[in-house]
Image (spheres, rainbow, N blue to C red):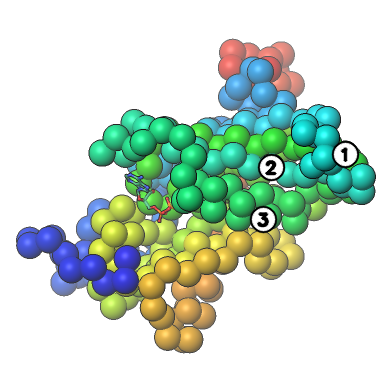
Amino acid sequence: MGGTPLPDGIKLMDEQGRRIDGRLPGELRPLKIEAGVLRRADGSAYLEMGHNKVMAAVYGPRECHPRHMQDPTRALVQCHYNMASFSVDDRKRPGPDRRSQEISKIISEALTHVVFTEYFPRTSIDVYIEVLQANAGTRCAGLTAASVALADAGIPMRDLVASCAAGKVANTMVLDLGKEEDNFGQADIPLGYIPRTEEVVLLQMDGDLTADEFRTGLGMAADACKKIYDVQRDALRRRYVVADDGGSEGVK
Ligand code: ADP
């Protein structure tokens, strides 16, 4: 990020305005979401966005431990984001690091905003996000999947959160940056958004943008979140259609 020089022979955008993976600037990577994929979790979702593969599992509301963490007025939404050591080309050192702690914190905050936490005092709602394959944008993929997993767990929520990044690559504003664009692009703005109420629940920025570019990027990411929201709702709808059909394989 921040305009790191490209290795020789690599071009992030061709003369026709196509990106390194063939997408147009405003195009999302292919998105697939399935709800209710884990038998032991209270709620779960599996998501693929381009080469990102993410599993989210929700447990709770359950008694919060250690007890001194309990809030007598509301539930704590505690996200645990983890990237598997085999999820990237170079083996990732297993275990938590500063990056995973940061991502866990911002996703916890984004989800706290939509869950009716006041319904479940003294409890914890634990959200596990496991990144099985990473190709940039995993915090957005994780938040999108976690929100579906919470709904699948039947946890009362104001609405679903959809998430997507916009950014600047080869002096062009683009949507949903891939790995090379994330590494060698000029800016990245991950957004967590509630399309129905137009509330922003996560917003970060890496790199430099003018105020106009920032506004354009935010608009692109918000529009994309509306499309992602439809895919999330569709995943939940399909989950219950299958369950109503008599609980076929793979559904709890
Ligand atoms: P995000 O995945 O939300 O875009 P970053 O911008 O921090 O978060 O990371 C971009 C991408 O860099 C990740 O999706 C992953 O492909 C890669 N990456 C992140 N951390 C590591 C790591 N420790 N080792 C190898 N690749 C990593």
User: Pointers 3 and 2 in contact (CB under 8 A)?
Assistant: no
Against 137, is 243 above or below? above
Q: Residue farthest to the front? A: 68
At horizontal 61% and vertical 52% (from top left) the residue drawn is: 105
- Quarter of the view holding residue 150: top right
- Quarter of the view holding residue 152: top right
Give x and y (percent) for residue 34. Answer: 56, 33
Q: Amino acid at mark 3?
A: Ala
Say which of 246 and 42 sits in front: 42
Secondary element at tag 2: strand
Of circles 3 and 2, the one toward us is: 2
Point out which mark residue 78 bears: 2
Against 130, is 18 above or below? below
Q: Earlier in the sequence, mark 3 or mark 2?
A: 2
In space, the residues marked 3 and 2 are separated at their CA atoms by 11 Å
Ligand 1 within 8 Å, label 3 CB:
no
Against 31, is 36 above or below? above
Q: Amino acid at mark 1?
A: Arg
Q: Which residue is mark 1?
A: 122
At horizontal 60% and vertical 22% (from top left) the residue drawn is: 38
Say which of 3 and 33 sits in front: 3
Say which of 67 and 78 sits in front: 67
Q: Which residue is mark 3?
A: 110
Secondary element at tag 1: loop
Secondary element at tag 3: helix
In space, the residues marked 1 and 3 are separated at their CA atoms by 20 Å
